[in-house]
Image (spheres, coloured by chain):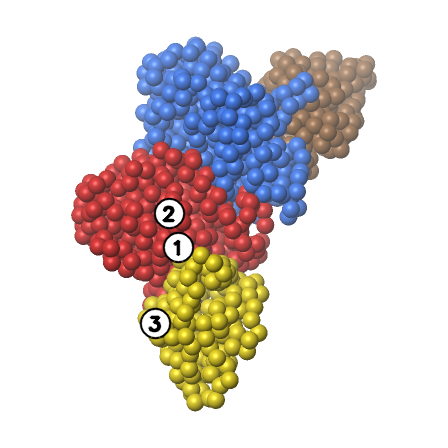
Chain colours: A blue, B brown, C red, D yellow
């Protein structure tokens, strides 16, 4: 394992310290407990939007802290949910007096730790609403699983909730919009290589030279099945089809298409996948009106990608387009 | 006759920390196969923090078993993260509430075990057979209850620990339906659940501590 | 070799087609010959800034096409300089009547092809000035080499030249500013893994599990020497010191610090390197007043990073801060 | 007596395309060691495009050797890229200017070779010993000049091709001071220069074409 790190146990803190120095105008990083706060805090009277989860998915979530998106982010250890005291400290610091929306990716650990953290601040009289992101169609949402996972669709929930909060919507409205996004967004991912958690020192799974793993999550965990590597067209189809089926997309609908890199995949390949997905959506008569391409929800240095589709309407489109000024996303 | 007093409780946590550290790579490997590979490191980090706080001369000495368990609960809650952090945290927090006395009788051990299981189930909503730590704790609590009339309280603990180990072993063939391993569906079968395994190690540490062989 | 591509021979075009679809509001991609043009073209009367080079370094250069930076980019095959007819077509299309600045990275191929392309359009009466970027201190600039290579410092030259053109500077002034940046910017890179050119199918060099290659270029070519992998602090020192020495930086000076990923390195590691570099510059009394962290000048999926330092003054800082709206860089 | 006419010039380019394709992996490997691994693919792409244009019935038939070389020059210039594209392009463009006749005499071959070398040097500013394609072309031109009085023009070509091959071989121990390989300094020694090697292949193809064994 070769990484640009020093002590693996300090890697998350080391990285956050560099992040804070590089973006001192935009964010503030607090330690003990660790969380990232928007510089200057939430404007008084505005709803705050807070998210968090294990580290190793950068720029998610800390890279999305800033005007128009998140007011705070709570990074855990690598691939490990943050603890309740981190969550409650972030919620408390982010509250601008109008309540806080907690955006939680559906993983047992994130759910349990946020739940406990939220209980702690509610006891202090802060109003908190939560939205669960569970966009990963690789996991069947049934009695026999912990439910679909939250993956790259989280970016859309955070962006749109942040825009709603920025325009002055109240907590109930921000939550309702976030839930509309969560209900209309689906994703599916593929790994070409596994990633190595620094303190583990070996990859999460092994893939032969001609195998790819379909239906991976974002924690280096294995996916649902392996297939022989077969080019961008075939892989894009395997990712896009279940997404489109699950959303029940029909001709004439408008969508946001987001092709996300897992961290070790060149941008040029993401554009190839994006192009293939556009062709396939066009064949179905689905209109792509908004696009996002980049490595935004990653699994350390994993090579691979995910395809996310969000069903758009006029209001969601307007909120997507609203200005955002964060280290990783800005327009 | 064994006495399960405050010193025992502190030895329990110290032994658990030592034994989990020794098993760290094994736990990591189990979690790498059916999860995300962090369970060993998470538990090691958390239990080391517990030992550090127990050793901290600035903190007031504990006067009840419950105070030891409460210190462990809040420390694990704020240092472990992941699914295991709140689950172990809640288990020990509930257990601490029924153990606020200088030492535990056999029925005290039974109550402690039952409270712990209730805490885990309240948080995680899993039941036996879903390939989680419940598969270790639930049979452990039941075994403790069956052993309540034992001469020596250590035997109650021993019954619990043996049942936990058997329960953890029994998770090997199971298909997970809770937690991260559930994403693997059938592919989760064939590997022991990491949280059940760490639970068995921690309950075995309670016995070791009772036998006076501390860390 | 596993990549999210179909026919390797079509990979650059496939990627550009996806890129054009994803950023239809910002850029236009032309084929036969291939180049990327800013949507709507250069505003009349403004100097155009054009750059180009082999593909495989995305988002460089096409990702920097847009208001405030490049007016056109010329992508060659992977790691292969574009041809003179591509260059001349791009220069011609970008010219807004006030002349064109060509930003050329110092590689024999880029220099020769741009030279020929420039000759062709000069014959058509278009005024072209060129600036050579040669920021890589890994290469000694001596009679015994082709001179220092152009690497990540190119981003600074393109950004500042683009800002000068956008505010209405004439060609001589834009060129002079670009040369000031080129004179004040130095870089050095490290590879943790080699990259694989799609049509070659195997990595450009081999590294043992505990080796890193110091002084690499951006074309998958081997570097100057190998050392045993030794953590972020040590590696950052090996990259930063020659950069600082070559620039002759002294206490009290202000700089831009740019930590660039080679394509396969997680953002979190780049922030660790950034943090280490900040500490080392602080020790020398050098003040970092502007920062950039990201994978902007890449070598396909190579794991590694480079450290770039640009000596700043008031005017360069102002031009760096000027608005930029491109697919890959915007503020 | 061999005649170096338009048909020969076209066969030369076709043979060069075939032989470079056959050597593509070898050229790639040489360039992978001392450059960036694209020389084989670049030259294959360029020469295939030349053959395609020679075969294009829509284009007017060539009437002079120079017209063939000019078509090759502009095609290579617009399809090869990299350092080799403008260098080969300029070489053939200069060569085309001194070969605008239906066939070449011995002195015509010598002029062609000299013009080519001048073109490469004018663009790349390299001289012999810098481990570039100049190390193949320069001795080739000199050998052609020495063989100018040969009975058969094919012998002039043959002398050039043999000298090119020897010159390319002689680049193996050299340390590059021009082009991408110069970045490696001492580490560039021990590998043949890819551009010198492709030059030797292309000049050998001129002999093969003259011997009537076309692609
Ligand atoms: N819903 C649940 N109820 C009980 N135990 C659970 C539940 N979900 C997960 N676990 C336990 O947590 C363990 C995983 O812990 P850990 O690896 O630390 O967290 P994470 O899964 O977040 O990485 C599992 O092996 C399982 O025993
Ligand atoms: N300045 C130069 N003069 C002559 N030949 C050169 C010069 N620079 C490079 N070359 C030749 O070009 C060859 C490399 O071509 P190629 O690999 O296609 O281009 P690139 O180096 O741009 O990848 C070298 O092997 C060498 O023979
Ligand atoms: Mg985890
Ligand atoms: Mg885990
Ligand atoms: Mg090249
Ligand atoms: Mg090359």
In the image, what residue occupies the spot 50% across and 48% down?
C10
Cβ atoms under marks 3 and 1 closer than 8 Å: no
Image quarter of the C terminus of chain D: bottom right
Note whether residue D215 is visible.
yes
Residue A331 to residue B100: above or below: below
**Circle 3 residues within 10 Å: few <14, some 14–19, many ≥20:** some
Count of marks, rendered view: 3
Residue D185 occupies quadrant? bottom left
Report whether C186 appears left or right of C11.
left
Q: Residue at x 48, y 89 (%)?
A: D151
Mark before the other along the chain sequence, 1 or 2: 2
The residue to which callout 1 is attached is C82
The chain containing the residue under callout 2 comes to: C
Q: Is disc 1 in contact with disc 2, using a CB cutoff of under 8 Å?
A: yes
Callout 1: chain:
C
Residue assigned mark 3 = D97
**Gap between marks 3 and 1, in whole Å?**
25 Å
Q: Mark 1 and mark 2: span between their CA atoms?
A: 9 Å
**Do the residues at pointers 1 and 2 share their chain?**
yes
Residue B91 point in image, percent of width and height: 64, 19
Kindly tell me whether mark 2's CB lies below 8 Å from ligand 5: no
- Residue C270, percent from left and from top: 43, 43
């Amino acid at each position: 394992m070769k990484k640009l790190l020093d002590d693996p146990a300090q890697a998350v803190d080391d990285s956050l310290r560099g992040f804070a120095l590089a973006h001192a105008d935009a964010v503030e990083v607090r330690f003990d407990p660790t969380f990232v706060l928007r510089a200057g805090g939430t404007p008084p009277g505005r709803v705050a939007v807070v998210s968090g989860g294990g580290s190793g998915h950068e720029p998610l979530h800390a890279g999305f802290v800033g005007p128009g998106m998140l007011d705070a982010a709570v990074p855990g250890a690598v691939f490990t949910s943050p603890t309740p005291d981190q969550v409650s400290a972030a919620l408390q610091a982010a509250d601008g007096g109008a309540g806080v929306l907690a955006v939680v990716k559906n993983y047992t650990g994130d759910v349990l730790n946020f739940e406990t953290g939220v209980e702690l601040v509610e006891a202090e009289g802060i109003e908190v609403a939560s939205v669960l992101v569970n966009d990963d169609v690789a996991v069947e949402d049934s009695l026999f699983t912990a439910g679909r996972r939250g993956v790259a669709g989280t970016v859309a929930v955070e962006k749109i909730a942040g825009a709603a909060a920025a325009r002055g919507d109240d907590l109930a409205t921000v939550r309702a919009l976030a839930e509309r996004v969560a209900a209309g967004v689906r994703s599916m991912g593929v790994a070409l290589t596994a990633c190595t958690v620094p303190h583990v020192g070996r990859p999460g799974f092994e893939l032969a030279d001609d195998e790819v793993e379909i239906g991976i999550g974002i924690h280096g965990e294995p996916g649902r099945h392996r297939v022989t590597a077969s080019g961008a067209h075939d892989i894009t189809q395997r990712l896009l089809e279940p997404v489109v089926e699950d959303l029940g997309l029909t001709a004439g609908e408008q969508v946001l298409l987001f092709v996300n890199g897992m961290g070790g995949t060149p941008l040029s390949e993401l554009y190839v996948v994006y192009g293939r997905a556009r062709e396939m959506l066009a064949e179905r008569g689905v209109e792509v009106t908004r696009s996002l391409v980049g490595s935004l929800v990653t699994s350390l240095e994993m090579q691979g990608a995910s395809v996310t589709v969000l069903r758009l309407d006029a209001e969601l489109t307007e909120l997507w387009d609203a200005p955002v000024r964060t280290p990783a996303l800005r327009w | 006759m064994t006495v399960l007093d405050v010193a025992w409780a502190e030895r329990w946590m110290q032994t658990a920390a030592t034994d989990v550290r020794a098993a760290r790579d094994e736990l990591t490997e189990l979690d790498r196969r059916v999860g995300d590979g962090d369970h060993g490191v998470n538990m090691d980090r958390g239990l080391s923090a517990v030992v550090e706080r127990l050793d901290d001369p600035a903190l007031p000495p504990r006067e009840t078993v419950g105070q030891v368990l409460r210190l462990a609960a809040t420390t694990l809650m704020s240092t472990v993260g992941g699914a295991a952090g709140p689950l172990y945290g809640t288990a020990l927090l509930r257990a601490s509430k029924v153990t606020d006395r200088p030492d535990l009788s056999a029925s005290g051990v039974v109550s402690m075990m039952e409270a712990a299981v209730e805490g885990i189930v309240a948080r995680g909503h899993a039941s036996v057979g879903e390939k989680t730590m419940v598969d270790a704790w639930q049979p452990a609590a039941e075994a403790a209850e069956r052993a309540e009339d034992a001469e020596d309280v250590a035997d109650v603990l021993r019954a619990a620990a043996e049942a936990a180990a058997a329960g953890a072993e029994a998770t090997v063939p199971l298909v997970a339906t809770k937690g991260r391993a559930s994403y693997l569906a059938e592919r989760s079968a064939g590997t022991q659940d990491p949280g059940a395994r760490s639970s068995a190690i921690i309950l075995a540490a309670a016995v070791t501590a009772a036998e006076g062989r501390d860390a």
